[in-house]
Image (cartoon, rainbow, N blue to C red):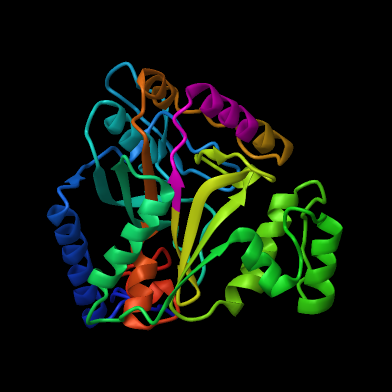
Amino acid sequence: MHTEPNWRPAAALHVLQLRATLLARIRKFFASRAVLEVDTPALSRAAATDPALQSFETTYHGPGPLSGQTLYLHTSPEFPMKRLLAAGSGSIYQICKVFRDGESGSRHNPEFTLLEWYRAGYDHFALMDEVEVLLREVLADIAPLACVTHWTYRELFGEFTGIDPFHTTSDELEDLLRTQHGVVPVGLGHDRLDAWLDLVITHVVEPALAPGLVFVRDYPASQAALAQIRPGKPPVAARFEAYLDGIELVNGFHELADPDEQQRRFAMDCEQRRVQGLATVPADQQLLAALQDGLPDCAGVALGVDRLLMVASRVRCLDEVIAFPVATA
């Protein structure tokens, strides 16, 4: 029996209209602060080395010297935006589509809209303040912030699990997940402590978060990604995340500017990819060259626009705020 394809948009018209309103307000917010809107390529010869991110790839068939070259769709505009910063752009922002393979679900779509911005002269504390102001202004008469709370990673983990994440083991975390929360991890080696910590965050901590805006900072140094490391006992990443009504929305860094450390982290990522049986991908040499020339002291943050729209429109699935999610694209 022939079935007609469902060509209609998954998102209701009023949600699409709300998306347009949020985007206009975001642009107005940055224009009022003289932050430059930029546009960088979605295709690159380099890919995300982070083992948690999988890039889509394609082949360019010419003409020109790149004919036959594998190109990757960006998972974030971070690297070319940092090249602009190194070239003297000053504070910048971008709203763009990004692409991540292997991500689909109630809060994921392999193609989604990201707002990313970088503030010259800011650290991650100043950027957290700006994130709060942005959300207050953008959501003012739509979904006003109920409250704002700040936690360190250690405080948050301890509050909801009773475990110190800086002094724990994979065995202890597995026992917590299995015996107290009925979560049975599959295929997760006990040598990957950060993966176990992430699993506890997503399955135990996030569901318990209070409504409103929740900032979490001072992540383990091993989870720094592209953030600086703050010395201390223990040292911590100059990184924060923010949740809005329990939905992970924001990831921000006091940005790493040391080219040698960045090269070391790329190498560590590539080794982790090898150990996990993931595809080898080329690291971004252009970024390393830009860092070598000099990245100004800055903080940067990425905010999921589709997830922001989920909160603003009070729906529970990302498909309800995207005109044509991957299943109907």
**Is residue 140 magenta-colored?**
no
Q: Is residue 202 left or right of residue 322?
A: right
Q: Is residue 243 above or below residue 126?
A: below
Q: Position of residue 111 (x, y in %)?
A: 39, 56
Give me the residue at 22% from left, 80% from top.
13
Q: Quadrant of the C terminus?
A: bottom left
Q: Is residue 28 above or below residue 124?
A: below
Q: Position of residue 306 (x, y in %)?
A: 35, 66
In the displayed orientation, state which residue is furthest to the front. Answer: 232
Q: Is residue 167 left or right of residue 142?
A: right
Give me the residue at 75% from left, 51% from top.
193
Q: Is residue 2 visible?
A: yes
Q: Position of residue 278 (x, y in %)?
A: 64, 40
In the displayed orientation, state which residue is furthest to the top. Answer: 65
Highlighted magenta segment, given as a residue range: 252-270
Q: Is residue 259 above or below residue 141?
A: above
> Looking at the image, which is closer to me, 87 or 326?
87
**Is residue 257 magenta-colored?**
yes
Q: Which quadrant of the structure image shows residue 323? A: bottom left
> Looking at the image, which is closer to me, 216 or 51?
216
Q: Is residue 5 visible?
A: no
> Looking at the image, which is closer to me, 194 or 135?
135
Give me the residue at 54% from left, 36% from top.
49
User: How many numbered discs sit on the rendered protein?
Assistant: 0
- The chief SS type of the magenta part is helix
Q: Is residue 290 above or below residue 322?
A: above
Q: Is residue 258 left or right of residue 93?
A: right
